[in-house]
Amino acid sequence: MEGRLIETGEEPKILSAGQYIVGQDIPQGRYTVTPVGEGSNFFVDGVGEVNTILGSYGEDSYTFFTVDGDVIQTEAKVKLTPVE
């Protein structure tokens, strides 16, 4: 199973456009983010910085780690799926 992502079984989280603080709005962990709809810019500011475009003009999905205090910003609705 090396190199494969496994969903944790926790419910995915749907985030509308906006800013979210890890540890307050969502728990820290590893997530795969996918666009809901056309997609848009997706950022994480913190220990592991992310700056990507999701959707038809970018990535189908993106997997990243978060820790408490990171700030997630999305310009459109996305789904965060917890993964191992």
Image: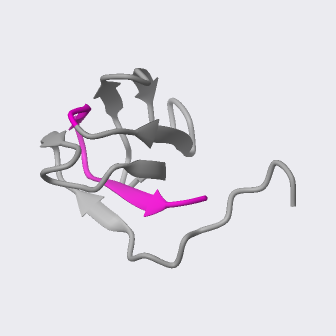
Does residue 27 lie above or below 50 as drawn?
below
80 drawn magenta = yes
Q: How is the image coloured?
A: one colour
What's the residue at 31%, 65% (across, down)? 13
Q: Quadrant of residue 45?
A: top left
Magenta stretch?
Answer: 69-84
Note whether residue 36 is visible. no
Q: Quadrant of residue 74?
A: top left
- Where does the image place residue 34, in percent across and percent down from the top left? 46, 51
- Where does the image place residue 18, in percent across and percent down from the top left? 12, 40
| 53 and 62: which is toward the camera | 62
Count of marks overlaid on the render: 0
| 67 and 79: which is toward the camera | 67
Q: Quadrant of the N terminus?
A: bottom right
What's the residue at 39%, 39% (across, down)? 66
Q: Quadrant of the C terminus?
A: bottom right
What's the residue at 55%, 43% (across, down)? 63
- Where does the image place residue 54, in percent across and percent down from the top left? 45, 37
Note whether residue 65 is visible. yes
Residue that lies at the very extreme toward the right in this rendered image:
1
Report the side of 75 relative to 79 (left or right). Answer: left
Does residue 73 lie above or below 48 as drawn?
below
- Where does the image place residue 35, in percent across and percent down from the top left? 41, 50
